[in-house]
Amino acid sequence: MTVGGTWGKILHIDLGSGEKWIENPPDEIYLKLLGGRALAAYLLLRDLPPGTDALSPDNLLIFAPGVLQGTNLPGSGRHGVAAKSPLTGTIASSEVGGWWGHEFKRAGFDALVVHGRAEAPVYLWIKNGEIEIRDAAHIWGMDTADVEQVIRAELDDKMSIAQIGAAGENQVLYAAVMHDINRAAGRGGLGAVMGSKNLKAIAARGTMRLPVAERKRINAVAKWLGDNYQEKAAWAVKIGTVQGVLNWGRLGALPTYNFREPIFETREQISGQLMHETILLERDTCQVCPITCKQVVEYDGQEYPESPYLRSDFFHKIKIDKAYGGPEYETLGAFGSACGVDDLLAVAKAHELSSRWGMDTISLGMTIAFVMECVEQGLLDAEQTGDFLPQWGDAQALLDAIEMIAFRRGFGDKMALGSRKLAEWIGNGAEAFTVEVKGQELPMHEPRLKQSLAIGYATAPVGADHQMNMHDTAYTRPGESLERVAAVQTFEPMAVNDLGEQKMQLFYHEVNFKHAFDCALICHFHPYDYNHLAEALSGATGYDYDARSALAVGERAQTLCRLFNLREGFTAEDDKLPRRVMKAFKEGPLAGVEITDEVFFTARNYWYGLMGWTQEGVPTQERLQALGLAELLDGISITVAA
């Protein structure tokens, strides 16, 4: 019997040969992995030869919803995308919202695995079990909004489209896969993998009713969300992530000048509050989500004389297209404070260009910030950069850099490599100014404030990541976060800079929870607890989950990703932080706060033990057996400890 919430079908397509085939996995694959990151990591371990070049035809590009896509549970409008990363060499795993995951799932498949490379540009059309490989010559080179318009006119106006822009076509190493024009599976260069396959887009439309085991159990969780989201997710309902510019800026935790400085004095000029007062047009949302956290901005050249802060060099020079949505917190920080740019219109335009051409705004902004610092330090000169010498705060240079990178023009060809590879090219100690883990640039959250986040940055399988992580500020007082964890272990409130054993035990549970969300899949902004997740999984699949068995899915995801990275040559030596974000600031709210090597490595190694890994970061055979992974991995080349 097929597990509820699934079709029992994984679709494989080889773009080189045109062959299509259906895999029918055993039930245990769904019950233990659910979908998303865990399923993708398993497929990569099983089917991707070790050491594969990430931009070769042999890499696999995987689109993986979970068992909750298609159920209409609020928050399930997300899906996972994965491959071997061209940016880092680790697994790349990114989650994205919108409607694509829902449409694809209701088209009759649980995942899509893309093999090979087409001889010429193509796109895929998937509708209710039917698959077609179509010519994409006429849309290759088009911006994402234009592609959306053309494909909808050709096929079906109710479809959802995943696609790449110019950056993916040109294999920028942090190119994104864009969904519904303005939702990015951004991290790790998944768009470059898609571009390397000559795959421009995947259009999906599904109207098939997904079988679930016990609809009433899912409906009960959905009703709880409907009754409580306005209170429990009030921050997202009211303004969304963009409140972070002022909130974190007040605490000295808004990344500024490439994480070098503690305070961005003019943060009001790029704040979410200013955006809401001026260029915000409306709020947007994803499939079956009432929270409407996404920003949509528009600018047509008008001035805002009533605002003391919106003073831009770009009045009457640019327009911002609402089709590309609007910047969220990560983008405001990466293009704004990290680069010293305090012009909201320029930052919003930078966001538009990133969606138009398909790039991860975090790696993009942080790479540009790195270049600005190298110019300041005299490590880059006009001969090396073709006279492109951006300075801190130069809004025009920010926009110029984005175009150069997307089309790999001039020095943009080097910036397209990301900060780590660019630093290797520059030499002369330039790596001291990179702020990355395993080659992936840090998001806009300050590890000196949130110190278990530092452990999460260092150990996340994809490189530095703020989603598959824990944010310490949520656990400093009694409340919902600690009440959620009480389903498996009781904790007292803890300081943000506590990295003791109790904090690491808390971290262990919460990061497993985040990974489980990314397998199920559920948006992290939804205030479900461990028992809600277990109940939704039980209702969908027809098999009983409790809090611990739901969290075990997240641990399996982390373990499978770890096994993949070990196979690709990564070790515990790679689970470290850039020195810059461990050193104390000399001033500001975080003055004197540091992360010492002793405290960091003691905490990291203790967490290894909680995961059932050796002090070298290698999973043990005993833990694989306990997680039910040993049989799944039988015959697959992996590194484990006795």
Image (spheres, rainbow, N blue to C red):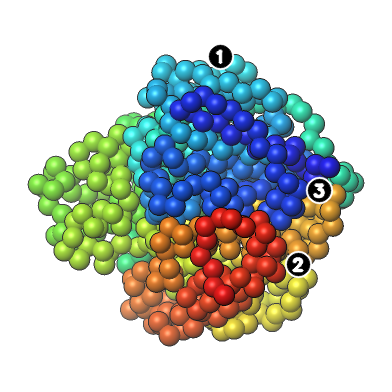
Q: Position of residue 556 (x, y in %)?
A: 64, 61
Residue at left 47%, top 75%?
Answer: 616
Q: SS at mark 1? A: helix
- Gap in angstroms between the C-alphas marked 3 and 1: 36 Å
Please identify the quadrant where the C terminus is shown: bottom right
Residue 623: image tag? none
The correct choice, above or below, for 329 with respect to 459 in the image is above
Q: Amino acid at mark 3?
A: Thr
How many residues crowd around disc 2 within 10 Å: few (fewer than 14), some, or many (20 or more)?
some
Q: Is residue 321 visible?
A: no
Residue 548: image tag? 2
Question: In the displayed image of the protein, which residue is found farthest to the left?
Answer: 383
Residue at left 62%, top 53%?
Answer: 38
Is residue 548 toward the left or the right of residue 186 in the image?
right
Mark 3 or 1, nearer chain start: 1
Q: Amino acid at mark 2?
A: Arg
Residue 541: image tag? 3
Q: Nearer the viewer, mark 3 or mark 1?
A: 3
Mark 2 or 1, nearer chain start: 1
Residue 154: image tag? 1
Residue at left 51%, top 40%?
Answer: 61
The correct choice, above or below, for 523 with respect to 582 in the image is above
Residue at left 45%, top 42%?
Answer: 59
- Name the foreground residue: 426 vs 393: 426
